[in-house]
Image: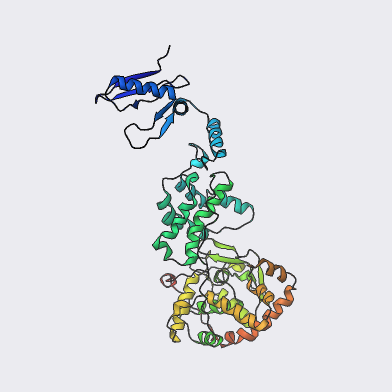
Amino acid sequence: MLKKYYLFRRNNGVFYCQIRLPDGSLSVNKSIGCYNKKEAEDVAMRWYITGKMPVRTNGKNKEETTTDFLSILNNIRTYDFSQDQVQEMFKVLKQREYVLSAVFAKSIQAKPIEEYLEEFWNSETSPYVREKKLKGQPIHTHYLSNNQSYIRNYWIPRLAGKVVGEITREDINAIFEDDEVMKRAPKTVNQIVGAITIPMKYAFFHNLTEKNCYDGIIKCSNKSKPRKILTMEETKALFETEWENDSAKLACLLSCYTGMRRGEVAGLRLCDIGEDRLYIRHSWSPYDELKSIKTGEEREMLIPPLLRNMLLAQAELTPYGEGESAYVFFGLVPEKPTDPANWLKYMRRALKKLGFINTEEYTIQSFRHEWCTTALSEIGDKRICMIGSGHKTDSVFANYSNHIQKEEALKKIAVAAEKLFLPLVEATEKVEYKILDEEEEVACETEVV
């Protein structure tokens, strides 16, 4: 017959015992906390009969544990469970609301968070990027690069050592307690948060985590500071003054006349210049190089003969002989146009010549804002202006714009543009284009469009 318990004494003279559990196994060694054998036997027998043992015998905590529970613990310690059996146990614990979630060893949820995030924002390895491309949703290299920087600078230092399934909403919200992070612009803070919430949302919907740690994150107010724009009088003075680089002057003049984004101006090729219009098909980015325009939808813009001739004259100066595919604002190598940051540099120098002090308040994008503001004031119909600017941010408004005849809208835009901006073109002195050397072409400033 198996003994009900075993007693033994340690070197310090204190008695320990092992109790026979209901399943026949023995409990772990438990200190009885006394030096007298008879007293130790009484305690051991009481533990066996009642089926209860104190968690600690020498502390203030009088919490007890049962021998049934000790049997369960023994089985857990010694039994070789399958993955399905472990999941079934946790399923029961979740049903009884003892646990909310669990991360299983060697499961996809146990992937190190730093490895997952690096892979997620990598254009070569990311399943997210692959899915976006398969669904016809462009995702640009510049965007991926920014998120890689946010991950490495802000998230991996905070989360390293954890696995995907461990990340909680509290882990993400803690970023708002970082004084250095909160010194950044609200838009930047939201981008930092997005660099983690986007991959975690993807992880949740692809069973990489059981935790929804992306909903309920209250982001910063994203109200942007109004873009500083020139008045029409200031703009006229700007283009009447002499610039250090006439190619930059023409690029800015084109943005002013058409409202084109700076990347769209840089991406303009000879084949995009029609008889009476420009075909705005591409945009240039140092990260993604030649790509589709921001909305993914090509648009047209009627231009006057004078501006068309100036663009053709600029394109003819290219030394590369690429024909119709040549960039109008060519760069130092055939396959790349000039860096738009150079235009910003020369534009601000021209503004300084006019007496402007805070020239950093003005960017190439300011011309686009000026175009939208003045064109809307002249035309009075936002739907027509959106056809010219290519804005598609308001889905309802975009549906309205679909009911307008494009050619009629383009003509109305052309009339307004000639009235507003043609004097700027006419006032511009005859362009004598200068081809800069490589050192001069190095951009000294950057601009986020």
The picture quadrant where one finds residue 373 is bottom right
Please report the residue visible at 59 percent of the width from the left and 73 percent of the height from the top: 260
Residue at point 69% right, 78% down?
381
Q: Closest to the observer: 68 or 131?
A: 68
Which quadrant of the view contains residue 35?
top left
Q: Is residue 35 above or below residue 56?
A: above
Closest to the observer, 437 or 10: 10
Q: Locate residue 360, reporting x and y percent.
A: 45, 77
Where's residue 420, x and y in %?
62, 85
**Residue 152 visible in the picture:** yes
Farthest-out residue, left: 12
Q: Is residue 344 above or below residue 352?
A: above
Task: Please state which of residues 107 and 21 is positioned toward the viewer in this rendering.
Answer: 21
Depth check, front residue: 284 or 186: 186
Report the colour scheme: rainbow
Quadrant in which the N terminus appears: top left
Residue that appears at 61% across and 53% down: 133
Q: Is residue 369 above or below residue 102?
A: below
Quadrant in the picture for residue 436: bottom left
Q: Is residue 313 visible?
A: no
- Total numbered labels placed on residues in the image: 0
Question: x, y percentage for residue 287?
Answer: 51, 61
Q: Position of residue 223 (x, y in %)?
A: 53, 70
Determine whether, in the image, residue 329 is placed left or right of residue 171.
Answer: right
Identify whether 14 is placed above or below 61: above
